Amino acid sequence: MFAIATLMTLISQVSGTPYIPGGDSPAGTDCSGLASWVSNAATGRPVYGSRFHTGNEEAALLARGFHYGTAPNSLVIGWNRSHTAVTLPDGTPVSSGEGGGVRVGGGGAYQPQFTHHMYLPMPAEEMADPLAPPPPDAPPLDAPPPDAPPPADQLPPPPLADAQMVPPPGDLIPQPA
């Protein structure tokens, strides 16, 4: 699966790339090329070289593990017969061809003109901001797992064998009669 940081790194690297119809390289791309790049990065494919277009977008997204519809905290792609755009799992819209080349912004996947939507679910643990402080009830980062045995220096001594049993202080030792 993917991390938002991976997608944001890709977007920052290609932001400002010119709009080139059918483009599939850092030299430029169109809207479906950008959607291809983002979906490829999100599914572990090479970013360039496996692009789709609005005519085969549904089949291409299904092959990459996308589901029909939209879902919160997911990578969402919307399209119609002539345009497509992306909304990242954190809600960031990205597009190409809406006022120029690749850019952060625009209407994203939720534009009213889009007649199709698909999403790639993202596990909740990957949505966490790695720089955010832990919740107040979270255990310390260096705490052992709750089911971990205690450290060796905190274990009780092993039991003595019967021959080595020593009565507690104050107990009388039976004497043979």
Image (cartoon, rainbow, N blue to C red):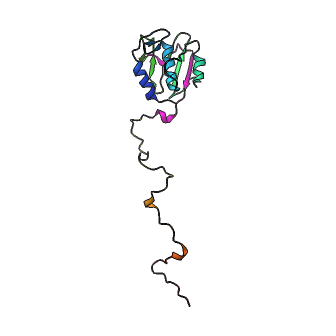
Residue 150 seen: yes
Locate the C terminus and report the quarter of the image it occupies.
bottom right
Q: Quadrant of residue 132?
A: top left
Query: Closest to the observer: 109 or 143?
Result: 143
Q: Position of residue 40 (x, y in %)?
A: 52, 22
Q: Which residue does the image show at 52% across and 24% down from the upper left?
A: 45
Q: Is residue 108 magenta?
A: yes
Query: Closest to the observer: 165 or 94?
Result: 165
Residue 68 seen: no
Query: Closest to the observer: 66 or 52?
Result: 52
Q: Which residue does the image show at 47% across and 32% down from the upper left?
A: 127
Check the image and report above or below for 95 versus 158. above
Q: How many marks?
A: 0
Q: Position of residue 141 (x, y in %)?
A: 41, 45
Is 85 placed left or right of 62 in the picture?
left
Q: Position of residue 17 (x, y in %)?
A: 41, 14
Q: Position of residue 61 (x, y in %)?
A: 57, 21
Check the image and report above or below for 168 versus 133. below
Check the image and report above or below for 151 versus 15. below
Q: Is residue 162 magenta?
A: no
Residue found at the very far bottom of the displayed protein: 177
Q: Which residues are magenta?
A: 106-129
